[in-house]
Image (cartoon, rainbow, N blue to C red):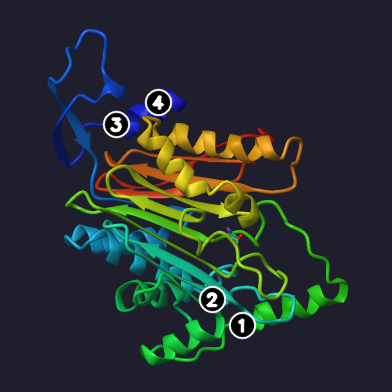
Amino acid sequence: MQRRKFLKKSSLTTAGLLSAPILASCKTENKPENVPVTIVVKKPVAICTWNFMNATAKAWEVLEKGGNALDAVEQGVMVEEADVTNETVGVGGRPDREGNVTLDACIMDKDGNCGSVVYLQNIAHPISVARKVMEDTPHIILAGKGAEQFAYEKGFKKTDLLTESTRKQYEEWKKESKYETVINIENHDTIGMLAIDSNGDIAGACTTSGMAYKVAGRVGDSPIIGAGLYVDNEVGGATATGVGEEVIRTVGSFLIVELMRQGKSPQEACEEGVKRIMKKNEGREDFQIGFLAINKQGETGGYCVHPGFTYREYTQDGHENQPVESFYKK
Ligand code: SD4
């Protein structure tokens, strides 16, 4: 199945061809050194964590018209930020244990520029505030009240992020006030998105309301460059969903991009990323993490701790929800 998936992903129905000298890491026995080989590049491509069909469709719409990867990932994840039925992103995200919805997001472009907001309240599109931090300030991360103030200065409107549904659920939760991570169930649905545009450039975005009923002030991996998201335009990009503390501890997305730099495929890199985490958590079964990656050739891959994580992929061949293999099989 892995092999089938690999062959499918390397299919020749792709858009770009790139000539490059053979790298030491991909030399084959019967090919001499420094002979040009043809590398098939699949582009454009948009992928995102979980089965967010509308978000990848939006990103694809941007890419198909020749738009750049940065615009595609921003506009793609904005679809989920605006969707009140997605209760872990943007408007309609679940609150912390004080009843406040606090949002985390980051974005990264092909040149390694990045912007991030953490613990942002009352703003519906944290990803666009993160982009403004990247483009309009000399900083990378703005937090809390300062981030909110910055957003108003940039013209973002104050928005009540709590909905009737999340307010009711919060009231219910307060009766027992139990904080536990629920594997794969609704308190995971962060959207991390990666795209390659028709120029072959890569960008990524990640946005979330974080773990439901978290301790006030808690920030997860999603807005942390290198943890929830990382892009290196020479190599590829990676993003994460799940229990952010474990992703931060391994600087997960950076790790995966570095593993791809060393020659691993996106699939192999995601597997190694999860295995590193599990090595530090031997025997623990009470958390989920899903990684997703794309390389410069447009190959994609994902891996997770428990079954249930999938990713959505949109290419010129159409769009698909890709099943992802897991560390634990049941
Ligand atoms: C966090 N990684 O705040 C996020 C949560 C998440 O789907 O991915 N939810 O830790």
Helix, strand or loop at label 3? It is: loop
**Residue at x-position 53% and y-position 49%:** 251
**Residue at x-position 52% and y-position 74%:** 90
Q: Mark 1 points at which residue?
A: 163
Q: Residues within 10 Å of mark 2 (few under 14, many from 20)?
A: some
Give the left or right position of residue 132, taking residue 276 as reference: left
Q: Position of residue 197 (x, y in %)?
A: 23, 54
Gap between marks 4 and 2 measured at Cα: 37 Å
Q: Which residue lies furthest to the top in this view?
A: 30
Q: Circles 1 and 2: CB distance less than 8 Å?
A: yes
Q: Mark 2 points at which residue?
A: 84
Q: Quadrant of the C terminus?
A: top right
The amino acid type found where label 2 is placed reads Val
Gap between marks 3 and 4 measured at Cα: 10 Å
Gap between marks 1 and 2 measured at Cα: 7 Å
Dividing the image into four quarters, tell me where ligand 1 lies.
bottom right
Q: Circles 2 and 3: CB distance less than 8 Å?
A: no
33 or 205: nearer the viewer: 33
**Residue at x-position 48% and y-position 81%:** 124
Looking at the rendered structure, which numbered label has been put on residue 10? 3
The amino acid type found where label 1 is placed reads Thr
